[in-house]
Amino acid sequence: MLRKHININSSPNSQVFLEMAEAIDEKKSSILGDAKFSWKDHAYKTAANEDYLYFWSNSKKITGFILYKKQESEIEILHLVCIERGEGFHMIDEYLSSLSEVKKVFLEFRVNNLSAKKVYDKAGFKEIGQRKNYYSDGTDAVQMLKEL
């Protein structure tokens, strides 16, 4: 299993991210359940920023990734995508273990995403607030923090 941090702002890494996004779009209805969201479109926008990607792959496919931003000693997790059900905790736990010189990790998720809450609670994140009507459909976002 390959695990790697990459800066998706540099070529050819941006191409890896775009290819991964296309593959996820093909399966998104079964993975993410949101047919309106396009990872490929998001990838093109994101690749222009200084975002980073930690991904897992076997010899045949990408099995999951964490898209994040890093600023000094803080990280904000923007997206965590698990292709395989039930792997979220293992992914976040391994990712957190891979970090050096990081003191705080922030993230947010939809208040009704109970499986995400379970994973982040188990990984030691603490709720620090909510953003009311944060998502376009009016759903609130839960904000969490883990201090390392």
Image (cartoon, grey):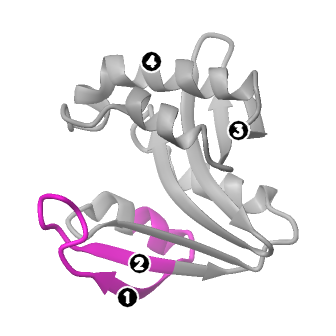
Residue 23 rendering spot, x and y as whole percentages: 44, 18
Residue 142 rendering spot, x and y as whole percentages: 34, 76
**Could you tell me how far apart the alpha carbons at marks 1 and 2 are, in whole angstroms?**
5 Å
The amino acid at mark 2 is: Gln
The residue at which mark 3 appears reads as 9
The residue at which mark 4 appears reads as 23
The residue at which mark 2 appears reads as 143
Disc marking residue 129 = 1
Sort mark 4 into few (<14), some (14-19) or many (20+) by Cα contacts within 10 Å: some
**Could you tell me how far apart the alpha carbons at marks 4 and 1 are, in whole angstroms?**
34 Å
Answer with left or right where residue 70 lies relative to residue 24: right
Question: Residue at position x 64%, y 20% from top?
Answer: 15
- Which mark sits nearer the N-terminus, 4 or 1? 4
- Look at the numbered disc 2 and give the secondary structure of its residue: strand
- Which mark sits nearer the N-terminus, 4 or 3? 3
**Could you tell me how far apart the alpha carbons at marks 1 and 3 are, in whole angstroms?**
30 Å
- Look at the numbered disc 4 and give the secondary structure of its residue: helix
The amino acid at mark 1 is: Gly
Q: Which residues are magenta?
A: 118-144
Mark in the foreground, 1 or 3:
3
The amino acid at mark 4 is: Ala
- Which mark sits nearer the N-terminus, 4 or 2? 4
- Which mark sits nearer the N-terminus, 2 or 3? 3
